[in-house]
Image (cartoon, rainbow, N blue to C red):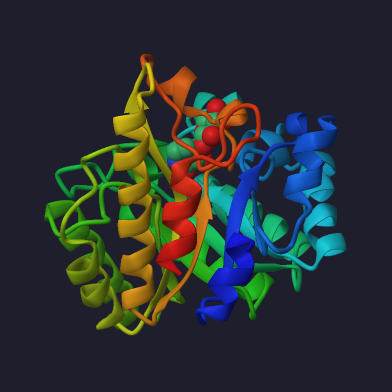
Amino acid sequence: PGLNYLAREAGKLYFGTATDNSEFNETRYQHILNNYLHFGQITPENSMKWYATEPEPGVFNFTAANAIADLAFRNGMILRGHNCVWYDELPAWVTANNYNASELAYIVANHCGTLVGHYRGHVCNWDIINEPLNDNGTFRQDVFYDTLGESYIPIALRAARAADPNAKLYINDYNIEGVGVKSTALQNLIKQLQADDVPIDGVGFESHFIVGEVPTTLVENMQAYAALGLEFAITELDIRMELPETPELLEQQKTDFNTVIHACMSVPQCVGVTVWDWTDKFSWIPSSFPGYGAACPWSSDYVRKPAFDGIAIGF
Ligand code: XIL
């Protein structure tokens, strides 16, 4: 059975994956990616990021992102937007020009409004704010926070709501999957946004985990977010191991994937699960975490790993 099929049968909206344009020319990759039974949802791994969509001030380019949106549309897959405002993968002009607060407020609102507006009616859920917090729960000192303080968050969310009133607007981050200071800080931020009538609909738990180290408080943490009246999703799931892979590590990885799916199944407000690519062949892990890899449910030669079964039996 396919993973999306099982997720839907279990009452979730989707099981999905990230994908990138550079992966499209592989016939075997395409064959599995296009299978709705496995993937009912697609996230562009890079193509909607700021550097790709507004490479020069006010000059937008949707070519790569449109190719992924088309793939999702052709296959009847839900499209998650990723992302509008992030400290990383910005084009140089955003940081290099020392914009003042009113200039940068316009730039943020224009970027979010134009990007979200372009996909109005096509993107179901949008990561509007990506990774705003440090691990100790303080705000990340990026160009947006340094120039605008916390106000960049409402500016972005309001521009997004105006551009597509039906899209669910998310804040997405990592190390908020278990109970802890960073998760508490994000809950406090959300309460503040709600008190200020700022549109916020959901939280994305990235979930880039390490084999054997999945937080033990996933469900308790999700319940805290559910109590805020929000939906949430597992948005970038992968579970890396120190290479080389061994049968023992692959078995533990199966257990760990199962734990994550099981947590999402335990809390109704968890709407779906996205893996940060489905095959080890195209995973971002080996280049970003040297010495680690094998983080996905399919191997680099497209064979289902024990992790696949861990997901399947979790739904
Ligand atoms: C990563 C991509 O997977 C890489 O291809 C890229 O080089 C860097 O970004 N958190 C996020 C994602 O929100 O956008 C990141 O994606 C992984 C961490």
Front residue (pair 33, 225): 33
Q: State the image quarter where residue 59 is shown.
A: top right
Which residue is painted at 41% across and 54% down in the image?
A: 310
Q: Using the rendered image of the protein, determine whether residue 179 is visible from the camera's viewpoint.
A: yes
Q: Is residue 157 left or right of residue 171?
A: right
Q: Is residue 175 left or right of residue 158?
A: left
Q: Is residue 60 left or right of residue 312?
A: right
Residue 235: x and y, percent? 47, 55
Outermost residue on the front side: it is 247
Q: State the count of labels.
A: 0
Front residue (pair 43, 215): 215
Q: Is residue 285 left or right of residue 208?
A: right
Which residue is painted at 87% across and 61% down in the image?
A: 74
Q: Quadrant of the C terminus?
A: bottom left
Which residue is painted at 47% across and 53% down in the image?
A: 309
Q: Is residue 263 above or below residue 82?
A: below
Q: Is residue 258 above or below residue 161?
A: above
Residue 50: x and y, percent? 62, 40
Residue 104: x and y, percent? 51, 45
